[in-house]
Amino acid sequence: MDSHASKHPEYQYLDLMRDLVEHGSLQVDKGTGVKTYSKFGHQIRFDIERDGFPLLTTKRVYWSGVLHELYWFMSGQSNIKYLVDNNVHIWDDYPFKIYNEKVKAGSVPTMTKDEFVAKIASDELFAKEHGELPHIYGEMWRRWQAKDGRAVDQLQWTIDELTKDPDAHNTLVTSWNPEYLYSMAKPGEGARFPICHNMYQFNIKDGRLCLHLYQRSADIFLGVPFNIGSYALLCVVMAKILGVRAGEFIHTFGDVHIYENHIEAAKEQLSREPKPFPTIKLGDFNSLETFKPAHVELVGYEPHASIKAELTVAGGYNEAMHGKKTTN
């Protein structure tokens, strides 16, 4: 393995994480005081057709979470109830944080997080009121609110555009709407979740669909393996709908960082050798509407064991910096 080209593709990720651990620039989150070690601007590439599906193997990636979260996005949903009902809890912290603000205001009773999640699962009206996260990915991809009241379906538009013109250069989907972000938003209208993987573009080259993601902020240890799996799967599913082969997934980072409390876990992962990537087997569907998680089978995934680390809820809206508290 003397040249980069001869290395397992996963080393692109491992080499970046090692660089952050050893040489990352120290930064501190303004809202929480959490330290990160970061760099700005980096790109990795995975050829899905040639090398297999890039679900990282040096630790087990939470595949059920990848699959159900992506379907949640692709189907235009923004309420965590679908995820809770499918035993995926990666989004629970954000609506629970909002709920606790209402507790402090005296408008709702105190609950533990477990009680809150159980209530989301069992009570449709409670979930409708307290499980919604407006202005996040599913809404932006499938239901972007235009000034005339229309809901713009960016993801369906990309399918229509590439079907009419496979050589199109304009099939880009964005989740970054300044109208709802930070101090750019009107009081009471700001998004409470920090949009991180904010823009991606499709392009067909030599009969292969490629997807290029730009991620403005990336948690290398917990988030990025999940993001790679998610957007590579999006490429595979969209290729199936378009009737072409899946090609490259290209991942470009803005600020990519490791949290201080993840460094020891990262060192354990860096000591492991990658294994062969799995493959994806797809069932019968031909549209966004007919695609379901049951159509996806992950084949041959035999990773190293999981490595646990605590999720850090940092970044995003900060009342001290961004003005009056937003609400749902």
Image (cartoon, helix red, strand yellow):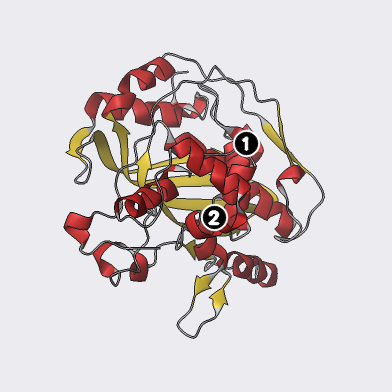
Q: Tell me the amino acid under the disc marked 1.
A: Ser
The C terminus sits in image quarter? bottom left
Q: Is residue 90 visible?
A: no
Residue 39 vertical position relative to residue 239 in the rendered view, above or below: above
Q: Residue furthest bottom?
A: 148
Q: Position of residue 297 (x, y in %)?
A: 73, 36
Of residues 168 and 235, the one drawn nearer to the viewer in this rendering: 235
Rendered residue at 23%/41% (across/down): 32
The dot on residue 163 is: none
Q: Nearer the viewer, mark 1 or mark 2?
A: 2
Between residue 106 and residue 233, name the one nearer to us. 106
Disc 1 crowd rating (10 Å Cα; few below 14, some 14-19, many 20+) is: few
Residue 305: which quarter of the image? top right
Residue matched to label 2: 126
Q: Which residue is mark 1?
A: 64
Res. 243 visible in picture: yes
**Disc 2 marks which amino acid?**
Phe
In the picture shown, does residue 254 fall above or below 309? Answer: below
Which percent across, then down, holds residue 238? 66, 55
**Looking at the image, which residue is at 35% across and 54% down?**
102
